[in-house]
């Protein structure tokens, strides 16, 4: 029995079918059968299916003698399925790389539920990818598996069959099949979810849902849209057959029906000319037939419900016109107020641009106004130390002003003071980009500090990575790069990447990253103070766990059971968990030995306080290596990460330390001491030789002396790695190293 039966109904999609089938057969998870159902397609689809079946034994070719439609074609595929779970995929859509591995892993984590719901992204001919707007409903937080009554909001998701994996014996036991006609997913999805005793969610984009410019039946003008009434009759007939479900779900499905009917009606290109009044009359009949008491809908929904309840075209036109007038009036008033305010501020900015530059002023910001820190923070402090005549200001949202030192002026984005500072300060420093409306004046100097050594693809290299580059304006990216005078680089690798992916006329300063200076300057007392402030017990071994962003996920990947790891390691160990700043939720709830530091303002402090770093593909590993402390890579989804984001090199081939490929192996690496053994030290030394050459504690000073003081010819020389003395770790002095014979016969890398 294969793990998955992937069923693909096929009709008139010869241009898309290769990509669809290859997205399944090319999965890293191979325990599957692919059932391709040729629904008597008049083009080359049947031949394409046969070609794949001839080359791959996992493909079952099913040819129907006549065209039966999507629903019955899926039923034909189910009749040939032998897998433990059924997965449906439309023949112009594709599975994302690593999707089946992620689905299988989540099924194991949740004890094999009846239904697993996963996410999708709409992909357009332009290359744009837009994630499902209700992705937050697929959170993996809370108890799992569960029943629909525990999370009824899941019915707000698109009523489709292809964003779920179904346990086959559950489907067969309940006798579920697809009906004929359009909107066939509605009488399938709702009953399946209502009857399932165990449901789980996977917060990961597993399907790319192609938005074809032409050819989708649901976007054509046809009387077949009237078939939606038959589908809802089937839904309510199912409820009549299952009275135990009716009381809870009839009001919910009634509201969903009304919303669905009004959505079809209000799409101007759906119903043929002359049929709209008839559609409304049928909708009114369904409204009266299936109406049940329930909570009053929201204001906008009340209009839709009124439209369907009254069922007259003239009434609809009157209601819709009134609603549009009200909405537009409110929108225009809000827009007019905002534009008037912006116009006044921009006029102020234009006046300030005509006034002289202030050579003793510098403006700093980082991470889109999130607060003081990173390379700009280290440069601001160095500027006050080495160029005391300079007056500095920092742009941050008011909620982050508490992170700013008292010696620098606070600026709120969008205020008159903000625009004045941008117009008249000679030095502009950021690790991202300033406001796109900023005008770079002659004589102004902009320093782009960057915020890490690039492992993942950046800049123009993202043009063929729609999941990672969604919404990115590459022309605007280059216009911003044209404003940069200097770009900071920590190593030769970074220099080569920055100059290629941001092709502009800036000067690269290969001086090291200022934010890493603290690792060479901090003392043992500083480390002890940071540990105490974080609540790390004296003598404990503190592991900093900091995974990176997944572009294909809405929430942070939670692949580690951190409490279980701590139980396996014993009371001596503490884990500091830091979620990526793009995610709001912590990696795990805090406890005595599991400390959430996701919102700590300074990651350098966390690195100093820890004894080892566990990460996956985060650029933090390059900075942490400057401490010459152990790094362990937990790399379990490299193929998916590489496919979605792309990388400049395979970090598994050149790691900063030993590699764990499972939770048990990670625990074993710490329990046996391999995390700080000789192999770990060898790997770290080679990594530091390549990426940490310039981070000797004086990077910020070199930048200030070169750019601000004009001392480019006499900068401090770079101290060799052998002569550096980074801040020592505090919690590993008496943790024994493993015996030489304790090492496995093959390295863990």
Image (spheres, grey):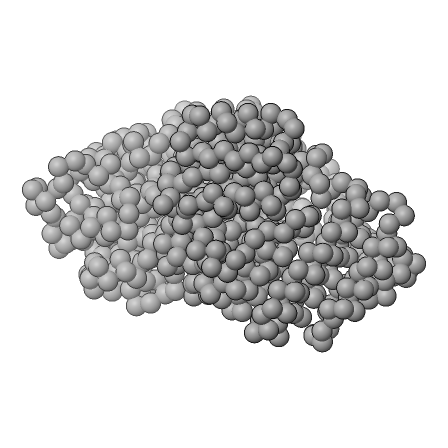
Nearer-the-camera pick, 405 or 312: 312
Seen at 73% across and 42% down, the residue is 219
Seen at 62% across and 64% down, the residue is 238
Q: Would you say residue 602 is visible in this rendering?
A: no
Nearer-the-camera pick, 736 or 745: 745
Quarter of the figure with residue 43: top right
Q: Is residue 388 left or right of residue 28?
A: right
Quarter of the figure with residue 723: top left
Q: Is residue 711 left or right of residue 250?
A: left
Residue 749 drawn at (x, y percent): 24, 36
Residue 361 drawn at (x, y percent): 57, 43
Nearer-the-camera pick, 114 or 67: 67
Residue 446 drawn at (x, y percent): 56, 35
Nearer-the-camera pick, 519 or 167: 167
Seen at 68% across and 48% down, the residue is 181
Is the residue 603 above or below the residue 501 in the image?
Answer: below
Seen at 13% across and 55% down, the residue is 734
Is the residue 463 above or below the residue 208 in the image?
Answer: above
């Amino acid at each position: 029995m294969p793990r998955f039966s992937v069923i693909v109904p096929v009709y008139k999609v010869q241009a898309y079918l290769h990509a669809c089938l290859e997205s399944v057969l090319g999965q890293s998870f191979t325990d599957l059968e692919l059932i391709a159902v040729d629904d008597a397609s008049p083009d080359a689809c049947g031949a394409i299916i046969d070609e794949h079946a001839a080359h791959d034994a996992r493909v079952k070719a099913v040819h129907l003698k006549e065209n039966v439609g999507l629903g019955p074609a899926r039923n034909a595929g189910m009749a040939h399925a032998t897998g433990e779970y059924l997965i449906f995929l439309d023949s112009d859509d594709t599975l994302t790389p690593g999707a089946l591995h992620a689905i299988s892993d989540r099924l194991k984590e949740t004890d094999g539920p009846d239904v697993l719901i996963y996410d999708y992204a709409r992909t357009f001919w332009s290359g744009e990818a837009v994630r499902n707007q209700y992705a937050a409903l697929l959170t993996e937080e809370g108890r799992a598996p569960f029943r629909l009554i525990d999370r009824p909001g899941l019915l707000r998701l698109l009523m489709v069959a292809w964003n779920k994996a179904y346990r086959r014996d559950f489907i067969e036991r309940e006798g579920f099949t697809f009906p004929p006609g359009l909107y066939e997913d509605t009488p399938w999805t709702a009953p399946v979810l209502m009857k399932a005793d165990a449901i789980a969610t996977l917060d990961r984009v597993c399907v790319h849902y192609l938005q074809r410019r032409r050819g989708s039946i649901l976007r054509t003008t046809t009387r077949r849209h009237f078939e939606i009434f038959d589908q809802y009759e089937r839904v309510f007939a199912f409820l009549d057959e299952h009275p135990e479900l009716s009381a809870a779900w009839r009001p919910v499905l009634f509201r969903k029906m009304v919303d669905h009917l009004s959505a079809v009606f209000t799409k101007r290109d759906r119903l043929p000319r002359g049929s709209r009044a008839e559609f409304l009359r049928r909708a009114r009949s369904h409204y009266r037939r299936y109406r049940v008491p329930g909570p009053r809908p929201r204001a906008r929904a009340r209009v839709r419900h009124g439209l369907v309840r009254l069922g007259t075209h003239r009434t609809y036109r009157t209601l819709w016109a009134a609603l549009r007038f009200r909405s537009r009036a409110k929108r225009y008033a809000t827009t007019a107020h905002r534009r008037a305010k912006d116009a006044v501020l921009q006029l102020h900015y234009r006046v300030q641009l005509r006034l002289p530059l202030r050579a003793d002023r510098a403006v700093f910001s980082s991470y889109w106004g999130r607060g003081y820190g990173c390379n700009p923070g280290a440069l601001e402090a160095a500027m006050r130390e080495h160029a005391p005549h300079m007056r500095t200001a920092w742009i941050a949202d008011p909620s982050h002003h508490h992170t700013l030192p008292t010696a620098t002026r606070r600026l709120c984005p969008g205020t008159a003071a903000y625009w004045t500072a941008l117009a008249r300060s000679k030095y502009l420093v950021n690790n991202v980009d300033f406001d796109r409306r900023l005008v770079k004046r002659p004589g102004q100097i902009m320093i782009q500090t960057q915020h890490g050594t690039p492992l993942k693809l950046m800049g123009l290299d993202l043009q063929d990575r729609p999941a990672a580059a969604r919404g990115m304006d590459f022309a605007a990216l280059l216009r911003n790069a044209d404003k940069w005078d200097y770009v900071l680089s920590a190593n030769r690798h970074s220099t080569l990447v920055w100059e290629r992916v941001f092709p502009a006329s800036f000067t690269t300063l290969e001086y090291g990253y200022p934010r890493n200076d603290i690792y060479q300057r901090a003392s043992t007392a500083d480390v002890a103070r940071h540990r105490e402030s974080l609540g790390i017990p004296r003598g404990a071994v503190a592991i900093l766990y900091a995974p990176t962003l997944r572009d294909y996920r809405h929430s942070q990947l939670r692949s580690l059971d951190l409490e279980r790891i701590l139980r396996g390691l014993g009371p001596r160990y503490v884990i500091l968990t830091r979620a990526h700043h793009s995610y709001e939720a912590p990696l795990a709830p805090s406890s005595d030995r599991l400390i959430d530091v996701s919102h700590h303002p300074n990651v350098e402090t966390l690195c100093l306080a820890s004894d080892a770093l566990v990460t996956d593909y985060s650029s933090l590993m390059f900075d942490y290596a400057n401490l010459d402390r152990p790094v362990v890579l937990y790399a379990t989804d490299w193929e998916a990460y590489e496919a979605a984001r792309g990388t400049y090199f395979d970090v598994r081939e050149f790691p900063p330390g030993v590699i764990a490929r499972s939770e048990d192996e990670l625990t074993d690496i710490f329990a046996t001491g391999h995390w700080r053994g000789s192999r770990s030290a060898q790997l770290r030394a080679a990594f530091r030789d390549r990426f940490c050459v310039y981070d000797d504690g004086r990077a910020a000073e070199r930048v200030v002396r070169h750019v601000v003081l004009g001392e480019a010819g006499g900068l401090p020389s770079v101290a060799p790695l052998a002569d550096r003395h980074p801040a020592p770790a505090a919690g590993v002095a008496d943790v024994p190293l493993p015996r030489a014979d304790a090492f496995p016969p093959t390295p863990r890398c």
